[in-house]
Image (cartoon, rainbow, N blue to C red):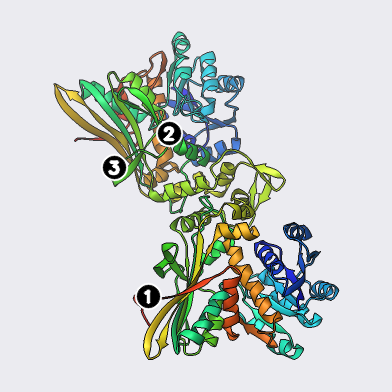
Amino acid sequence: MGTVLIIGAGGVGRVVAHKCAQDREVFSGICLASRTLSKCQQIASEIDGDIQTATVDGDSVSSVVALIKKVGAEVLINVASPYQNLPIMEACVQTGVHYVDTSLDDVRDRIKYDYADQLGFGPRFKEQGITGVLSIGFDPGVVNVYCAHAQKHWFDSITSIDIIDCNGGDHGYEFATNFDPETNIREILADVISFQDGALQITKALETRRTFEFPGIGTREAYLMTHEEVLSIAEFIPEVKHVRFWMTFTEKYLTHLRVLENIGMTSIEPIPFEGGSIVPLRFLKALLPDPATLGARTRGVTCIGCVIEGQQNGEPKRVMIWNNCVHEECFAEVQSQAVSYTTGAPAVLAARLVCTGEWAVPGVFCPEQLDPDPFMNAIGEMGLPWQTRNE
Amino acid sequence: MSERVLIIGAGGVGRVVAHKCIQVPEVFDMICLASRRKEKCDQIADELEGRISTAEVDADRVPEVVALMKAFDPKLVINVALPYQDLSIMEACLEAGVSYVDTANYEPRDEAKFEYHWQWAYRERFEAAGLTALLGSGFDPGVTNVFCAYAKKHLFDRIDTIDILDCNAGDHGHPFATNFNPEINLREVTANGRYWERGQWKETDPLERTWDFEYPGIGVRRSYLMYHEEIESLCQNIPDVQRIRFWMTFSEAYLTHLRVFENVGLTRIDPIEFEGRSVVPLQFLKALLPDPGSLGARTRGQTCIGCLVEGEAGGKRRRVFIYNNCDHETCFREVQSQAVSYTTGVPAMIGAKMILEGQWDRPGVFNIEEFDPDPFMEDLNRYGLPWKVEEVGDLAVPDGPVA
């Protein structure tokens, strides 16, 4: 039916390419592009059937525009660095191509971030008759759709949403991060923004924790953290009073992190060393296992979902909705573990829904603003089935 | 009559030894402080008044040390340089006719082996030359050995067991810092424990045995059974002793830091490629950690090191703890070094004084417990390391007495 242009050839890009190649009825043409051509070629070589590869500079609107025109893309899936969302969206507007991404642009300053810049493209997308779906990975992404689904089918009003994320996988290393250690560690050590009692609140990193029972894994301690879906859900789910994001870390992981922070190893300030200078966090990244090598050795399950409270027919109600994803099954299917899989597969579904018309609403949207039904009906077949329980 | 003394080594301990020798003019005449880097010697000399000269010497090179000895003509050398250099300095002593004192046993450069046999092999040559070599005159080894000799002479008819306990409760206010190479720290805590029992060496897993011992002046601290070099000489020189163990305190936070360094590869000594150059992770770790030289001025608290000795006296069981408390800030005020250097440097000075005064000047190579402990014990009280003896018959000791 059309050609998809995928920008980004990391772990998520690999999943997206594999998943698009499984759906040739919709994605008759696939082009995988990134700054480093060899990474694209490596992924293409793992997949049966024709996949084009290309070099692109995601920071440059003209570079992206030229590539879109060259491949004749109908939809673009952006899984490159989140710092490149805005130039890539601009290129989509200029060429009239649908846009899908999996995380908010530039979250370098996690206290001041919001969706205004990206949602600001709305009128221009609408004018062009194209659709932009923002942040449709798992969290943000699928969890936003869970909330929209709950609001549409299960509740008259929602008062509280707790998004809970547990990666129960074990890679066998004493310490490693599942994605870029620089991003990962800064995210964890940053101040925490949450939505409570109808207002944004700021607390210290790793200060607030709560115990949750994660289906398929067990009881784990989860820490309140900043995550971009908190902001959009607080805005787009009417009347909600509390939106919080919780992520589990093992005591061992946190111990490593605290020690590394204590000695200054997580700092991004360069320190003088042997006549030059070194940024400690970058050096740490060089020491730690390459996240791309973790997939093959990770065993276990992820559990990500929402605990939602509210009223229906005047009665209080509490529902949990979640997905379990098995690392080794993901790896067998797409040569990536579950963290990449759960991010990449929803993006491919969103691109499909835009191309097939079910989500082809002109404008730019966060996932919870769109009709959850076609997404919820198909996400199981994409490899991410959901389960619920009343609590 | 006072004598000329050469001090080799201008680190924290060298500073203490120089300060202390200068304080005792009736024994120490001119002092020469030498090290590989003369400017470190000069800096210490600047803190002192009179009677001190400085020199550059590579202590690995016997002829250089001999030349310095011939030029300065000391009666005795106090070696507080690197333990790799003990043998070359002992060689130079024989050639130049100089007596010898050190604080730590010789170690080969490429392996961590704490054994006396390399130095004991010099016994006959020192004897023939009419020179004295006093080994291990720091605190532990050193003062702890003298405590044992004192216990044997004055407190017990028979000693059964000795537990040497070492606690540094100093707080430098950093989450982690070290006076030493972190790689050596790590090696220390990952090495098997070893102790002596009924004529045999026994091994434990690293940090396997613990003892929550109450240190006078400090409180209860978890102590870990480790190997320490004085066990090797004490088991030969204290007759009838059935068991000798050494325990050292580490805080949980210290151990956690070291383990994390190891887990993430920060203690690696092989270079890794980083941004177009090669970087040794351990060197980068050192660059991140606080400068060891800056720790002395900010360390608060005390050390407590002592010997828990058990045996028989007058037909009855007896158990005593002989120990010293040393306060970091007091040391720093006196000699601009904290207690870890102070407790090593002061006994080195006293050991040298014993030889120079003729009380310990027997020709040969000796561990410190082989000499009469009394004048040394007196001088500990006099020169800043007062000791106490406490009866601790009621204390619970791990594994009890040896049957």
- Disc 1/disc 3 C-alpha distance (Å): 42 Å
The residue depicted at 66 percent of the width and 71 percent of the height is B83
Across and down, in percent, residue B97 comes to: 79, 82
Chain of the residue under the numbered disc 3 shown in the image: A
Please identify the quarter of the rendering in which residue B130 is found: bottom right
Under mark 1, the amino acid is Val
Label 3: few (<14), some (14–19) or many (≥20) C-alpha neighbours in 10 Å: few
Q: Chain of mark 2?
A: A
Q: Are marks 3 and 2 on the same chain?
A: yes
Q: Amino acid at mark 2?
A: Gly
- The residue to which callout 2 is attached is A344
Residue A152's x, y, as percent?
Answer: 24, 21
Q: Secondary structure at mark 3?
A: strand
Which residue is situated farthest in the top direction here?
A: A127
Q: Is residue A176 visible?
A: no
Query: Horizontally, is A346 left or right of A62 in the view?
Result: left
- Name the mark on residue A211: 3
